[in-house]
Image (cartoon, helix red, strand yellow):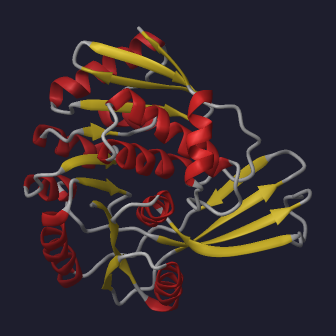
Amino acid sequence: MIIAAGLTPAYQQILVFDCLRPGEVNRAQEVFKCASGKVLNVGLALHYLGGPSLTLALVGGAEGESIEKEFASLGIRRRWIWTPSSTRTCVTILDRSGGVTTELVENAAPVPAAQIGQFVAAYHEVVKQAEIVVLSGSIPAGVPKTFYRDLIAGTRARVVLDASGAELFAALPLKPFCVKPNREELGRTLGRNLETEEDLRRAIGEVCDLGAEWVVVSQGVKPLWVGCRGKTGIFSPARVHSVNPIGSGDCLAAGLAWALKSGMGMFEAVQFGMAAAAENAAMMLPARLNLERVRARTSEIKYSEL
């Protein structure tokens, strides 16, 4: 089984405009509402790819009830920790005229210690069944930056960690199987700008030296870098007509985890994850993947070793 776990899900509103005019009244041509946020996107993607998975997250309020209703209707196995505060709402604005995506992100509300304790207890219960765990998302205010490190300490399964900054840095000594920051996040974690390819190569090596077995560094539409101790590769992404890119990084993490559980090697798994990310970008709602289309896209991902 694959476990998707995180503290900061979201309820998503997607507004589509033919031509957005800042400072004026704009009427959306289309509106969509759905469960989203990193942990839920990973859980949704795993469900659509198939195979046993479970999503563990904090939810609350009417937004949490809407998330529960959607996951229940899809038959997704889940474990919710209900909080006094409502799940945050994030807004995606799609401007068709310029092909521009704008994301308005609400920070997650602080979480009482009792609910954090319930989450940790639930995690240690369900992780016993896991072969792979995907930990993803930001940490709410008041939660220690060592939160992911402490979860990994009690995890025997391979861990894919999608985090950055202090949360990622603190977790590295626990030797997560794979960490998945983007280039900006990796630079922020190490406290410097990664301006050149040599900067990026050295940063990947440094993170491996600090404990990560594999480092996957995404760059949006630019080539993705993968490295372990003594080996670095570059993957060129598939060309795709982007409809809504939100959630593509989460689908990369989910596709990578799914492929690893299916027995693929790391580079093959990254290729599959990148195909899942490309498929996500071609759709309106995040993480609602189609397994056969993802498989078909893998041949579009080109790999070269440095």
| Residue occupying image coordinates x 70% and y 32% | 239
Task: State the quadrant of the C terminus.
Answer: top left
At 39% from the left edge and 39% from the top edge, which residue is drawn? 181
In the displayed structure, 120 sits above or below 99; it is below
- Residue 191, can we see it? no
Given residues 279 and 91, the one toward you in this image is 279
> Is residue 133 left or right of 146 when viewed as pictured?
right
Residue at point 23% right, 48% down? 159
Q: Position of residue 203 (x, y in %)?
A: 32, 22
Report the side of 259 relative to 252 (left or right): left
Asked if residue 86 lies left or right of residue 80, the reply is right
Please tell me whether residue 196 is drawn above or below residue 254 in the rendered image: above
Give x and y (percent) for residue 270.
Answer: 43, 34
Q: Residue at x 38, y 58 (%)?
A: 137
Count of residue discs: 0
- Quadrant for the N terminus in the image: bottom left
Q: Is residue 127 above or below residue 89?
A: above
Q: In x, y percent, where is residue 279?
A: 63, 47
Vertically, is 100 above or below 237?
A: below
Percent position of residue 223, x then y: 55, 24
